[in-house]
Image (tube, rainbow, N blue to C red):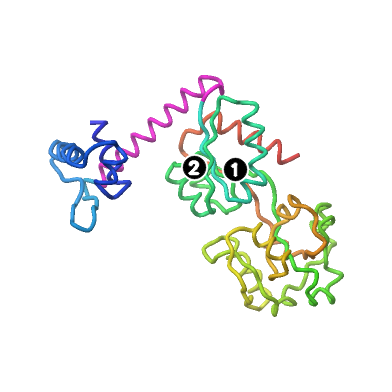
Amino acid sequence: MFQSMDYIYEVYKTGSFSKAAKNLYLTQPALSIAVKKEEKELGQPIFERTSASITLTEAGKAYIDSIEQIKNIETSLRRYCNDLSDLKTGTIRLGASNFILSQIALPLISSFSSQYPGIQIDVREAPSLVLKNKLLNEELDVIIDPMDFDNGMFSVRPLLDDYFLLAVPKSYSVNESLTSYALTHHEICQNIHLKDSFPTVPLEKFSEEPFLLLRPESITYERAMKLCSLSDFTPQIRFYLDQLITSYHFVREELGIAFITDNVVKRNPPDKSVVFYKLNPELAKREISAVCKKNRYISKASLEFIKMAQRSLSS
């Protein structure tokens, strides 16, 4: 039965008997026979087969749901047994976006791997919404991300604060009338922008400038549009980009202005060709957190990684 379950789950994942057979190192006829045998034992068809596609029947949906429950139980058991080895073996499936992975998580991964060489860290790089879905589907154990998460579904452990800034090429003439609001790379590293006494720039002053925004499906895009909306203008978008760090590089090349965060500035070399501005404090702040799915077993290795991240980033 369990072998048949693996076969059927592979057909479900690939949506194709031929692809599933290839992945399982079987012939397609052998795979079809195994699936039909399982359907006969169930007394119900699992797949509806047409010339164009394969879909699950109602019984098939229940069958796949049962397989996933069994796989989750098996995974939890393996993690529990790994924990009994006192962090000598095990796996952490960790997800983060490009910037967070390379600039924030990478030193943590290196430090953790040095301390616990027997723990394998399986790293996945993806946008926030993709990571969230993978965590919900239990494809990941931990993600490090700044999204807002439903506390009823997720366990959220804050790691560090992140503040949006406006980055503007120094050569742009709009800066000339805004010198009292301007901040340098050094001042950002000194957290001058976090002082209540430092003024917030009137964002509407940039309404005629070309903006560099992340793509509309991103959470950062929503925040950028809200900031502009509160200043009563719609930004003139020159480029849609995928990463905050890419936006920063485009600003440095004088291709437009962008919303980036202070951690992007702090974790990159000083650049005197860019001017920074403080934004609305209520909308500018976000938390980068370590996030797990609630109501499932969290391994000792994952918990230790999160504790290490909290200790490291809080200091």
223 displayed left or right of 192: left
Residue 94, above or below 283: above
Look at label 2 and name its amino acid: Lys
Q: Is residue 284 visible?
A: no
Residue type, label 1: Ala
Quadrant of the frame with the N terminus: top left
Number of labels in the image equals 2
Where residue 45 appears, as percent x and y from the top left, is: 16, 46
Residue at horizontal 28 percent and vertical 43 percent from the top: 20
Q: Measured along the vertical axis of the image, is residue 93 above or below residue 218? A: above
In the rendered structure, find residue 293 and report the number of the disc placed on it.
2
- Check disc 1: other Cα within 10 Å, few if <14, some if 14-19, many if 20+: many
Q: Please check the rendered image and state whether residue 76 is part of the magenta-colored stretch, yes or no.
A: yes
Residue 77: name its quadrant.
top left
Identify the element where label 1 is drawn.
Answer: strand
Q: From which residue to which does the magenta span run? A: 61-89
Percent from the top left, x then y, of residue 108?
65, 37
User: Can you tell which quarter of the image residue 216 is in?
Assistant: bottom right
Identify the residue at the far bottom of this view.
208
Q: Position of residue 243 (x, y in %)?
A: 61, 58
Residue 175 visible to an observer of this rendering: yes
Q: Quadrant of the C terminus?
A: top right
